Amino acid sequence: MCFVDSHIHLSDSAYDEYLMLMIGIINNLKIRVYSVSEDLESSVKNLNIKKKYFVNSESFKAFVGIHPQHASAKLLESFNDFFLRNTESVDGIGEIGLDPTYTTNNDPNTIESQRTVFSQMLSIAEKNNKPVSIHSRRSLNEVLDILPSYRLKRVVFHWYDGNKSFLKKINEFGYYVSFGPYLLYSEDKKTLLTKSDLSLLLLETDGPVSYRHCFNNSLTSPVFIISLLNFVSTVLKKNFNDVSEKIFRNSVDFLNTR
């Protein structure tokens, strides 16, 4: 049996001194990870981890991109050059999106700069047929208005935090949603889980985000995904192995790879 953590930031500095431990967990427990980036630096670092530790391995998928928190049109030319040099090594584009939260008291980061960067990231994904991991806090409506302008089918709304109406719309478009460990302590999110299309469901840890209401606020590890799967199977009243296999197949289909 193989498990998948569809969204984790292993290139984050919080993992630097624990990276070999994380690699051991990934390899020994057969957990695949989709490691996402937030800027050019973390994108480069993500690819370096893949090239150094996961050559000819399906266990580590490297996503590159510019997070709305770091949106800057000045980064685009450098990012484009980086992407063109490494296209074949890139497995997906993310974490990208819109988030008005980051425009408060942050003059260089405006919603317009975020839109410019988001549009460029989506264009890269479309042109190169890459899956996309979306950040959509407080921007679900606008993101859903933008996405149909691009020929993208392999899209996941990471850390889904919208309502049932948006969830239905997302699934009708054929887009995926991903839930994290907050499921373990949020009744609202458990309800959303039961309303999700199981064929379009992914699970994630979003490490290094930590969880004080579960996992004792410890450094987030890909191994958490197994506990999350167990909880999901309980909530959905389905066999653990069946749910695990279904989520794994969803994760493979999202990447469109074996």
Image (cartoon, rainbow, N blue to C red):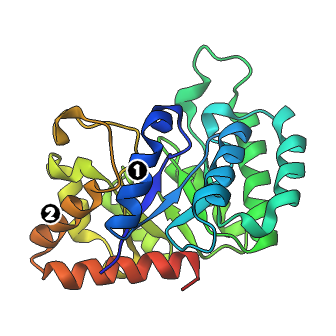
In x, y percent, where is residue 137?
A: 47, 42
Image height check: is 201 above or below 62?
Answer: below
Image height check: is 131 above or below 157?
Answer: below
What separation in Å lies between label 1 and label 2 (alpha carbons)? 22 Å
Which residue is located at x 69 percent, y 70 percent? 130
Q: Which is nearer the eye, 52 or 151? A: 52
In the image, taking residue 175 as reference, residue 248 lies left or right, namely: left
Q: Secondary structure at mark 2?
A: helix
- Res 144 seen here: no
- N-term mark: 1 or 2: 1
How many numbered circles are shown? 2
Tag 2: amino acid: Phe
Image-quadrant location for residue 123: bottom right
Q: Which residue bears the numbered disc 1?
A: 22
Image height check: is 29 above or below 206?
Answer: below
Which residue is located at x 58 percent, y 82 percent? 256
Q: Which residue bears the numbered disc 2?
A: 231
Tag 1: amino acid: Met
Image-quadrant location for residue 250: bottom left
Q: Which is nearer the eye, 11 or 16? A: 16
Which residue is located at x 16 percent, y 67 percent? 230
Q: Which is nearer the eye, 210 or 59? A: 59
In the image, taking residue 123 as reference, residue 105 lies left or right, namely: left
- Res 10 seen here: yes
Image height check: is 96 above or below 193?
Answer: above
Quarter containing the C terminus:
bottom right
Q: Which mark is residue 181?
A: none
In x, y percent, where is residue 56?
A: 62, 74
Quarter containing the N terminus:
bottom left
